[in-house]
Structure formats: structure tokens, C-alpha cells
Amino acid sequence: MDKPSNPYATPVAASDQVDASNLQGTYGPFRNNGTLKKILVSLLVIDAMLNIFNTGILNYMDMQQYENTEYLLSEDTSQLDNIIGIGGLAHAGLNIILIIFFCIWINRSCKNAWLLDPPRMSVTPGWSVGYFFIPILLLWKPYTAMKEIRSASYGKDHALKAVLPLWWTFWLMTMLIGNITFRIYMNSDDTESYLMACKLDLVATPLNVVLDYLAIALVTGITLAQQRRLKNWHQ
């Protein structure tokens, strides 16, 4: 038997809070990227340190080494050459891991953006990552995708208004310098060409370090913004 209601009791407003675990978007439920954010931040900090050590310190020492006539006449590799080789392999391995985790984060963040604010979204999770690997399109399409994810995550278009364009500007600059440097290294058949590539690496070192920390700000900002919007979600 139902318990009779008390007509004199103070009315209690029905809660309009939605259970976050029941939310379903175009691409499924909300993905908690908290752990992924911590992994990415750690990888980006390590990448910044390796940039300073490899393309900064070791690269400068290598340039000094090439000014030594005895080294140029010797057919044996020096201890510094071995250290540079090991450091380069370690950095290349880290970059592969970093790219994989960053792509996963972008994909998951895009899916969350579709759940949080679908009207602001047009790019799919697949293309938000895929644009980075398509020539010509990679010059601007990933940026437009990140702008949509940013806007849907914060619920406004002006969040991260300095970080996002700066991150993209530094990404384009380091990509351009990196491509030029790689081509010079591959085609260098004399000391002057090799040293030119080394100098470009030195120029790119502070740019890459700044890029890493801008990426940390971007990943942290969007991840926390999505978590806040989910926590405050109302019907």
C-alpha cells in the first residue's frame, strides 16, 4: 500500500542532475582522460629534456668536434659519436610513443566533445587525428579540429585563445625546420652542410621545448575543462 503524501510538507524540487555514467553521445560514453593526461604530461616533459640534451648540448659538442682536425682525419668513431647515436635512438623511440598517446588523446577528446556540445562539432574523431598525416591538409585542418574540440570542451570559443594559436604556430615552425634539417643531413656530403644542419638543430631546440610546454597547457586545459563540464552537467 502506498504511503499517503503529506499535503503540508515543504515541496522538494526534483533534481535535474544527470547521472554522468548514463550519458551517451554520438560516439558513446564520456572518456575519462585523466590518466592519459598524466602520461602525456610526463612524456612531454621528458621530450623537452631530451631536446635540450640531444639537439642542444650534444649537438653543440658535435659542432665543436667537427672543428677538430684530428677528428676529421680519423676513421674511428669517437665516444661522443656513440653517445649521440644512443641519444638519437632514445629520442626517436620516445617520439613514436608520444605521437601514439597524443593521437589517442585527440581521438578520445573529440568523442567527448561530441557528447558535451554536438552543435559546435563537425570534425569526426577519426579525421581529428587523420588530418595530421595528410600532406597539405596538415597545415591547417588539425588546427581547425582542435579549435572545435576546445570550443565544445569549454562551451565557448574564446578559451585558450593564446595557448591554442601559439601551440599551432610553434608546431608549424618546428615541423618546417625539422624537414629542412633532415634533408640537409641526408644530402650532406661535406662538413659545411653538416654544420649547417647542426646550427638549424640548435635554432629548433628552444622552439621544441616551448612547443612541449604549450602542448602540456593544451592537453591539461582541455582535459580538465571536459571533466568540469561533465561534473556540472544538467539536463
Image: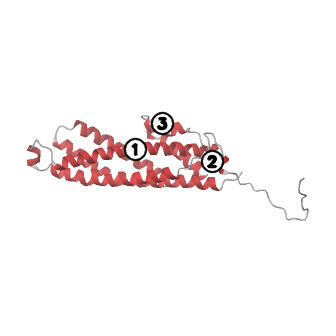
For marks 2 and 1, the one nearer the N-term is 1
Residue assigned mark 1:
97
Describe the element under mark 3 as helix, strand or loop.
helix
**Mark 1 crowd level (few <14, some 14–19, many ≥20, 10 Å Cα):** few
Describe the element under mark 1 as helix, strand or loop.
helix
Residue visible at 50% across and 55% down in the picture: 220
Describe the element under mark 2 as helix, strand or loop.
helix
Residue visible at 58% across and 46% down in the picture: 112
Tell me: 88 left or right of 221. Answer: left
For marks 2 and 3, the one nearer the N-term is 2
Residues 11 and 63: in front is 11
Residue assigned mark 2:
116
Asked whether residue 224 appears in the rendered view, the answer is yes
Residue visible at 41% across and 55% down in the picture: 213
Residue assigned mark 3:
130
- CA separation in Å, label 3 and label 1: 17 Å
> Is label 3 or label 1 in front?
1
Q: Position of residue 191 (x, y in %)?
A: 16, 43
Tell me: 76 left or right of 162. Answer: left
Q: Position of residue 48 (x, y in %)?
A: 36, 54
- CA separation in Å, label 2 and label 1: 28 Å
